[in-house]
Image: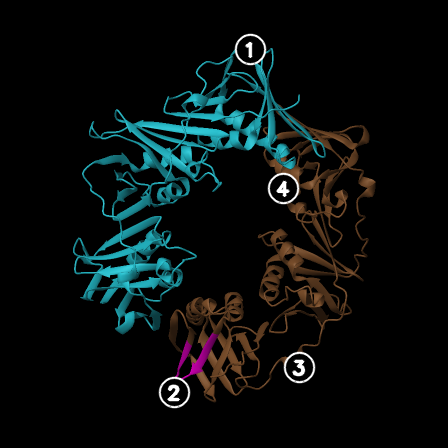
Chain colours: A cyan, B brown
Amino acid sequence: MKLTISKNELNDAIQQVAKAASSRPAIPILGGIKIDVNHQFVTLTASDTDISIQSYITVEQEDTIIAQVEKPGSVVLPAKFFVEIVKKLPSEQVVIEVGPSFQTIIRSGSTEIQMVGLDPEEFPILPSIEQDNLLQIPGDLVKSMIRQTILAASTSEQTPILTGVLWNLHDGQLKFTATDRHRLASRTTKVDADETLQFSNVVISAKTLGELSRLIPDQNTLVDIVVADNQVLFKMDNILFYTRILDGTYPDTSKIIPQVFETELVLDTKNVMDAIDRAYLMSREEKTNIVRLATQEDGMIEISSSSTELGRVTEQLEAKSMSGQPLRIAFNSKYMLDVLKVIDSEQLFIGFTGAMRPIIIKPMDHDYSMYVILPYRTTN
Amino acid sequence: MKLTISKNELNDAIQQVAKAASSRPAIPILGGIKIDVNHQFVTLTASDTDISIQSYITVEQEDTIIAQVEKPGSVVLPAKFFVEIVKKLPSEQVVIEVGPSFQTIIRSGSTEIQMVGLDPEEFPILPSIEQDNLLQIPGDLVKSMIRQTILAASTSEQTPILTGVLWNLHDGQLKFTATDRHRLASRTTKVDADETLQFSNVVISAKTLGELSRLIPDQNTLVDIVVADNQVLFKMDNILFYTRILDGTYPDTSKIIPQVFETELVLDTKNVMDAIDRAYLMSREEKTNIVRLATQEDGMIEISSSSTELGRVTEQLEAKSMSGQPLRIAFNSKYMLDVLKVIDSEQLFIGFTGAMRPIIIKPMDHDYSMYVILPYRTTN
């Protein structure tokens, strides 16, 4: 293998795939980036077997030669060093040449780097996925749906299935659900897909979705999504992103979501977020994050927290509307803030079914997202 | 004590002093910020006994009322929570009122905070320093001198005196020296001071100088420096910064600095920094950071590093001038990079007195700074 390639194009592709290279590889090959060169494409691939990312560089782009391929071939190079050295190379052009035993020489300006390359035959093979039934969703919508749900996923490996986000597709409605048993987030959207296309119990690691989100371009692009038996493939521009579907059955969460409320509030999102943020600062000192909310007779609500050592924060907040029973309730302020930060609506609805029943939070502007937080049992 | 004060002015002053409050106080009072209020000034003070920072807010500034003082007084408030809550208060005005037993109430908009205040009588008393003999130095010069020397100070508490920077003043020359026994940095400047003013063995913690540096305004301001028996006071605008002088005698470093050289090089600072940075990336994988430099017959130098697992980086670099004996030497590339990053000169001089003798590095543009790095003993 021998080619001369633009440093910037090479660097962009490396940065895109590098996240999939294992930082503590069980075997060295999993900590590598595979480079495949033919006369049309330079393809970079990294895989830790849970996720795999592939990025293509087209050799000739609109009459511009991005890479001059002298000899096609493949090699695997250790990711960590390769990622860092390429961006620091002195010239705009980089020559990569693979010799016997995958010994690789990288030249740029007056810099010469010899790298111990690995055999590409040993690199994991990407899953082969039938691409018949694909779902097309705008990139920024995928990003919002991820951001608005992953906050509620569990971070504990004790319940692996809950570290994922559940995807369901029925009747042209795609729904994401995440819960760690203390809180729940769900987000739906209508999708343009073949009516026969539907799936359930597709659970994808929340951490992986976070990584995917960073790779989706900010401009208006479409993401093609293919759900296969145990893999999901995301295609965007020149990137393929494969992730494993988590094993196990996601619990039924429909029963914990209350449908009728004893107390209903409409609040200004920014005001309630700022007030809870201040109360959170005090509650954090007690490690519990307990913040209390109480309705008052004058259409105001009081938000408060206290710490035996530090003191007490008390906030008065006007409700945009209030109906039902008077209420005193305590909850984890960090969980509430996580929700308030992703609510894309100027006003929000909070419904309560009593001090010990789940709290429901919804944006006022639309019905696409819904959050549940379990309250704390407190003595007063 | 009771006053109404501008949130922004209060927040600025809190941010300035907060660094001196102990984050893990041995006694609660050392983790506090003291507020003293009279009809001229609101003064904030924090002290962990090693350093103390005081910031003044003038109550009336150019016909603008910054603070309305209803009742003078003092209180100490826990720094961590106070620092975070003030910047998040909802209104531009903050009311602070101290009641019996130093119970403090902070009001802003519809927020009310009760804080457990502490007795200001228990707060450390700031050192009283005779301010006769002061040194005036432009703020940006103090900042450069700190930045160009603290890199060589030791971070090991096993030799406490070497965690400091040595200050000497003789014949109107102020000199900073730092060394961790593997490398040395020195920086001198002429100062306008009374000729009788001189001192030696004034050693100030490098970490403290780093904190001081962040407090010095970027605009052209003068810093007043008063060196007393066991304290140094820095005065800038509305801030007083006190630091303890480290106990002990700083070692004599004059003997390790070579005066004659067997090999002399002049190099382009940016080129050699970039080349060593690339070699460093490889050397770091071996944990040793060893990079080699070898002169060549054609006026070029070769910089290289290798890792048994990864490979080898080789850099060719043209010397702007080269004289003396051919040379092969090995050194810690991280130490060299630390120096190259603070050399404020397009070209630099490197002098060698043999493979096992100290390497000296100096800017070509001026004689005010000088760096020494001890080479590595290597087998080839």
Dominant secondary structure (helix, strand or loop) of the stretch shown in magenta: strand
In the rendered structure, which amino acid carries the disc numbered 3? Answer: Lys
Please rate how many residues cluster around mark 1, counting C-alpha atoms within 10 Å: few if below 14, some from 14 to 19, many from 20.
some
- Of the image marks 4 and 3, the number of the one nearer the N terminus: 4
Secondary structure under the numbered disc 1 in the rendered image: loop
Query: Which residue corresponds to mark 4?
Result: B12
Q: CA distance from mark 4 to mark 3?
A: 46 Å
Please rate how many residues cluster around mark 3, counting C-alpha atoms within 10 Å: few if below 14, some from 14 to 19, many from 20.
few
The reply to whether callout 1 and callout 2 are in contact (CB within 8 Å) is: no
**Could you say where residue A198 lies in the image, as x and y percent from the top left?**
25, 30
Same chain assignment for discs 4 and 3:
yes
Q: CA distance from mark 3 to mark 1?
A: 84 Å
- Of the image marks 2 and 4, the number of the one nearer the N terminus: 4
Q: CA distance from mark 1 to mark 4?
A: 44 Å
Secondary structure under the numbered disc 2 in the rendered image: loop
| Residue drawn at point x = 66 percent, y = 81 percent | B255
Q: To which chain does the residue with label 3 belong? A: B
Query: Which residue corresponds to mark 1?
Result: A325
Instruction: Judge whether B301 appears above or below B74 on screen.
Output: below
| Residue drawn at point x = 62 percent, y = 80 percent | B257
Does residue B293 belong to the magenta stretch? yes
In the rendered structure, which amino acid carries the disc numbered 2? Answer: Glu
> Start and end of the magenta stretch?
B291-303
| Residue drawn at point x = 63 percent, y = 70 percent | B180
**Could you say where residue B56 lies in the image, as x and y percent from the top left?**
71, 43
Query: Which residue corresponds to mark 3?
Result: B255
Query: Which residue corresponds to mark 2?
Result: B297
Q: CA distance from mark 2 to mark 3?
A: 32 Å
